[in-house]
Amino acid sequence: MTDIIRRAAIHAALGDPVRLAMVDALLLGDRSPGELGETFGLSSNLLAHHLKVLEEAGLVVRARSEADRRRSYVRLVPDVLAGLTPAASAPMAAGRVVFVCTRNSARSQLAAALWQSRSRLPATSAGTHPATRVHARALATARHHHLSLDPHATAHISDTIRTGDLVVAVCDNAYEHLTARPPLHWSVPDPVTADTDDAFERAFTDLAGRVDRLATALTDDRSPTKGTP
C-alpha cells in the first residue's frame, strides 16, 4: 500500500493542468521559480503552492545557483515518474547541438561526447571563458565509459555557435553570463570544484540521463544535402 499511496500522490500532483505543464517544461531543462512563474502567468503565491505540491510528491527539487546564491533552480526528478513519462512541451529540431559551460573543460565536453555516442545529429562544445585544455579527470571519466575526448579541443562560444544550432548550457555560470539565454539549461554541479573521481562520475551520470531524454525529443533539422544518409 505504501507504493500505491506514493503513486497516488504523484498522480494527484500531476492532476492539475498547470503542474502537469510545469513538469513538461522541466523535462529537458531546469528553470528558476521566476522563469516558471513568468511562463505560466502565475502570482508568487500560486507559484509557491504549485511548487510545494510538486516537491512534496518528490517530482521536483530545488538547488541554489553556483553563480548567484540568491537564485535557485527547479529540476525534475525523472525517476519518480516511473512509468509516467512526460512529453516535451513542444517539438524541437536542430541542425547541431552545442553544449556550453564556462571553461569548456569538463561538463560540456562530456555532454558532447555522450551525445555523439547516442545520436547521429552532430554535436560540439564551447565555453564562455575556455581553458587551454580539457580537465584531466574529465578525460579519465570519458575513457572509463569508452568515450574519446581531445585534450586540446576547447573553444570559445563566439567561435562556435552558428545558425540552426541548439545551445544547451550545462552550468549555471554560463547560463547566467550569456546575454542571449540558451533555450535549454542543465544545472549540473561543477565537478571541478570538488575535483574528485566521484564528483566527475556524478556529473557524467547526470549528463547521461539528460542527453538520453533530449536525444529522444530532438529531430534532425538539417537539409537533405547536409544530412547524414
Image (cartoon, rainbow, N blue to C red):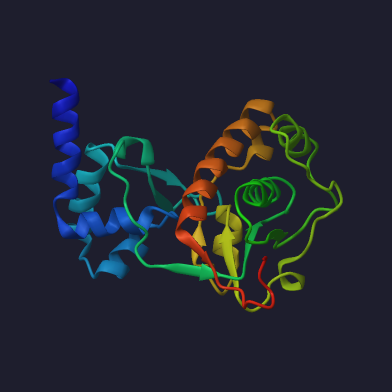
Task: Give the position of the C terminus as an image quadrant.
Answer: bottom right
Residue pictured at 40% horizontal, 67% vertical = 91
Image location of residue 99, percent across then percent down: 63, 58
Image location of residue 160, percent across then percent down: 73, 69
28 over 55 or under it: above or below: below
201 over 39 or under it: above or below: above
Residue pictured at 69% horizontal, 75% vertical = 226
In the image, 148 versus 121, the foreground residue is 121
Residue pictured at 87% horizontal, 51% vertical = 152
Image location of residue 202, percent across then percent down: 57, 33
Image location of residue 197, percent across then percent down: 68, 27
Task: Give the position of the N terminus as an image quadrant.
Answer: top left
In the image, 62 versus 23, the foreground residue is 23
The answer to which quarter of the image holds residue 95 is bottom right
Q: Residue furthest front?
A: 229
Question: In the rendered view, does 24 fall on the left or right side of 56?
Answer: right
The answer to which quarter of the image holds residue 149 is top right
Question: In the rendered view, does 167 fall on the left or right side of 155?
Answer: left
The answer to which quarter of the image holds residue 89 is bottom left
Count of all numbered marks drawn on residues in the image? 0
Residue pictured at 65% horizontal, 34% vertical = 200
